[in-house]
Image (spheres, grey):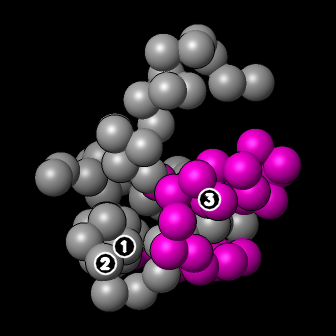
Amino acid sequence: MEAPSSADARGAGPTSRVLYERGGTIRRVVDDWFRRGHATPRVAMELGNAEATKKLVSAGLGLSVVSEIAARPEAKAGPWT
């Protein structure tokens, strides 16, 4: 699993993040990505469920990173607004 470049972590801005709970692989990758980019995310909430995470992001609670598999249905449906 590869995260985006470190430069992107600083440019992610001050928006709150809805992240996976600590201890999982995706959370470790995301935390490492922020660390490499010398950025500290403002965490609004930590969840263990991708569907709940996507609903909170859709409701405007913040940004998140989910696996490609978790995002596949929405990606097939077209651009998010």
Earlier-in-chain disc, 1 versus 3: 1
Q: Residue at x 41, y 86 (%)?
A: 22
Label 1: element kind: helix
On the image, numbered disc 3 is attached to which residue?
53
Q: Quadrant of the C terminus?
A: top right
Magenta region includes residue 9: no
The residues colored magenta run 38-65
Q: Residue at x 36, y 73 (%)?
A: 27
What amino acid is found at the position of numbered circle 1 in the picture?
Arg
Label 3: element kind: helix
What amino acid is found at the position of numbered circle 3 in the picture?
Thr
Magenta region includes residue 62: yes
Labels 2, 1: front one = 2
On the image, numbered disc 1 is attached to which residue?
27
Q: Which disc, if any, is residue 24?
A: 2
Mark 2 and mark 1: span between their CA atoms? 5 Å
Q: Which disc, if any, is residue 74?
A: none
What amino acid is found at the position of numbered circle 2 in the picture?
Gly
Residue 53, position in %: x, y?
62, 59
Query: Residues at badges 2 and 1 in contact (C-beta under 8 Å)?
Result: yes
29 lies above or below 50: below
Earlier-in-chain disc, 3 versus 2: 2
Give the image quarter of residue 28.
bottom left
Residue 34, position in %: x, y?
39, 70
